[in-house]
């Protein structure tokens, strides 16, 4: 029997960015894993970095599924067995003043408000922005045999912007979130399941079983599904919508932090001066 052709294939366009990751051509392939269950597989070598071209193509794929196919469940996964996503191309991201507000955050908003159930099938590592992208889905299923989930921003000196933090505060307990961000702890699948980061373990077959058990295909038919998600994840949606103001907020925080540091140093200097006088 010949293989069933994909529903659609979207090439990830080549970009002119300086990163070698950006210049790797890739694609999104959408197949039907079961009736009204859409498996969206992406490949952007070497490790599915969240570049502008990748993000734009991801959004287009979700648009096609929503507006050209019967309502159902969306599973996203990687065709690269080692990585679901290794996060941002960070150096290029922070050099691009439009990246967060015009590229990354629109993708996350599209995912978290998608009017159909979404599942991230984590077949490999999901680090930093890759894990954040997985958290923007409604559910997560992870390969039990390999891969780690990790927020390693501390390791490369990156701050957490408001939407990056709020999705974890909404979906996880604070102890788990603290261990993630202040320890860069790596969670294998079984530990991630225990902590509530993921909802199950396995591959495509287990994900389909999860969909059947949760009756997600039927729930996807509800007209209010997307609206309910917008309210459920209201804090995250708000932070994504206010992303244009995030730079101003972070700049104000930096200035306030600098002011407090100067005040603290002055108190120390004054204290040292008092000690010096006492010795004379």
Image: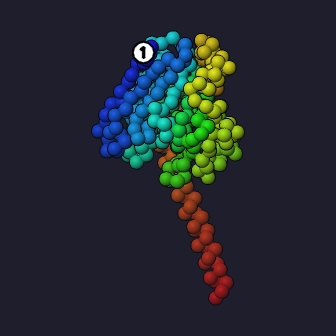
Quarter of the picture containing the C terminus is: bottom right
**220 shown above or below 249:** above
Dividing the picture into quadrants, the one containing residue 59 is top left
Label 1 CA crowd tier, 10 Å (few <14, some 14–19, many 20+) = few
Q: How many marks?
A: 1
Q: How is the image coloured?
A: rainbow
- Residue 1 picture location, percent across and down: 44, 14
Q: Say if residue 13 shows up in the picture.
A: yes
Q: In what element is the residue under mark 1? A: loop
Q: Eyeballing the image, is 33 above or below 269?
A: above
* 82 sits to left or right of 52: right
Please identify the residue farthest to the front as the structure is shown.
1
Q: Disc 1 marks which residue?
A: 2
* Residue at figure coordinates x 39%, y 22% from the top left: 9
Coordinates of residue 224 in the picture (x, y in percent): 61, 14
Q: Position of residue 89 (x, y in %)?
A: 42, 43
Residue at 32% from the left image edge and 39% from the top image edge: 23
Give how far across and how far down residue 31 sits, in percent.
Answer: 47, 19
> Which residue lies at the image location 62% right of the left edge and 43% below the top edge?
188
Residue 162 versus residue 5 in the image, above or below: below
Q: Nearer the viewer, residue 100 or 196?
A: 196
Name the side, left or right, on which 177 lies relative to 95: right
Residue that extends furthest to the left in the rendered view of this protein: 16
| Residue in front for this viewpoint, 165 or 134 | 134
Is 217 situated above or below 26?
above
Residue at screen point 48% across, 32% down: 78
């Amino acid at each position: 029997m010949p293989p069933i052709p994909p529903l659609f294939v979207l090439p990830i366009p080549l970009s002119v960015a300086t990163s070698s990751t950006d210049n790797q051509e890739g694609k999104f392939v959408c197949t039907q894993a079961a009736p009204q269950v859409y498996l969206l597989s992406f490949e952007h070598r070497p490790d599915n970095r969240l570049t502008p071209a990748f993000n734009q193509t991801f959004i287009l794929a979700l648009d096609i599924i929503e507006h050209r196919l019967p309502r159902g469940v969306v599973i996203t996964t990687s065709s690269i067995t080692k990585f679901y996503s290794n996060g941002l191309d960070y150096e290029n991201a922070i050099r691009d003043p439009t990246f967060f507000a015009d590229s990354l955050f629109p993708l996350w908003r599209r995912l978290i408000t998608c009017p159909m159930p979404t599942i991230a099938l984590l077949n490999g590592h999901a680090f930093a922005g890759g894990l954040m992208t997985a958290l923007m889905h409604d559910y997560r299923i992870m390969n039990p045999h390999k891969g780690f989930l990790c927020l390693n921003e501390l390791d490369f000196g990156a701050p957490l912007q408001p939407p990056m933090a709020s999705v974890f505060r909404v979906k996880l307990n604070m102890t788990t979130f603290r261990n993630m961000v202040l320890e860069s702890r790596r969670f294998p699948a079984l530990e991630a399941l225990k902590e509530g980061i993921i909802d199950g373990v396995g591959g495509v077959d287990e994900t389909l079983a999860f969909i059947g058990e949760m009756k997600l295909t039927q729930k996807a038919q509800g007209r209010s599904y997307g609206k309910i998600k917008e309210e459920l994840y209201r804090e995250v949606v708000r932070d994504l919508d206010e992303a244009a103001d995030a730079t101003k907020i972070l700049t104000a925080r930096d200035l306030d932090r600098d002011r407090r540091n100067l005040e603290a140093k002055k108190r120390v200097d004054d204290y040292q001066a008092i000690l010096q006088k006492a010795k004379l």
